Image (cartoon, helix red, strand yellow):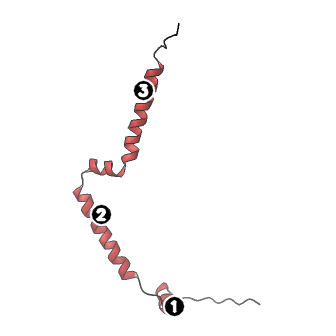
Amino acid sequence: MKITVDVDCTPEEARTFLGLPDVKPMQEALLKQIQDQMAANLHAMEPETMLKVWLPAGVQGMEQLQKMFWSQFSSGSRPKESKP
């Protein structure tokens, strides 16, 4: 035998019925705090500095990769000395 029960209620009603705490005020306070911190940090930084902070490995890694390729190309084009 199989019994199915469908309950039509809002998440707030289900939380109240199950005795769970309402975390909405805490979430709103934390999101407001995070938003304020992000806004303060964005206003304090210049665009060039932000890119260096956000993409340090990407940009510098590409520059290092380019330097390595150029050094390999330049050393590969030189004629090798023959041993007597």
Q: Which comes before the other along the chain, label 1 or label 3? A: 1
Location of residue 48 with respect to 64 vertically, above or below:
below
12 or 19: nearer the eye? 19
Residue found 27% across the figure and 47% down from its top: 48
Q: Are dots 1 and 2 in contact, CB under 8 Å?
A: no
**Label 3: which residue?**
71
The percent position of residue 72, horizontal first and vertical second, equals 46, 26
Q: Which comes before the other along the chain, label 1 or label 2? A: 1
Which element type, helix, strand or loop, lies under badge 1?
A: helix
59 or 17: nearer the eye? 59
**Label 1: which residue?**
18
Q: Decide if residue 61 is on the left or right side of residue 5.
A: left
**Label 2: which residue?**
38
Which element type, helix, strand or loop, lies under badge 3?
A: helix
Q: CA distance from mark 1 to mark 3?
A: 67 Å
Circle 2 residues within 10 Å: few <14, some 14–19, many ≥20: few
Q: Amino acid at mark 1?
A: Leu
Q: CA distance from mark 3 to mark 2?
A: 41 Å
Location of residue 47 with respect to 36 vertically, above or below:
above
Q: In which quadrant will I find the N terminus?
A: bottom right
Location of residue 53 with respect to 17 vertically, above or below:
above
Q: CA distance from mark 1 to mark 2?
A: 36 Å
Residue found 31% across the figure and 73% down from its top: 32
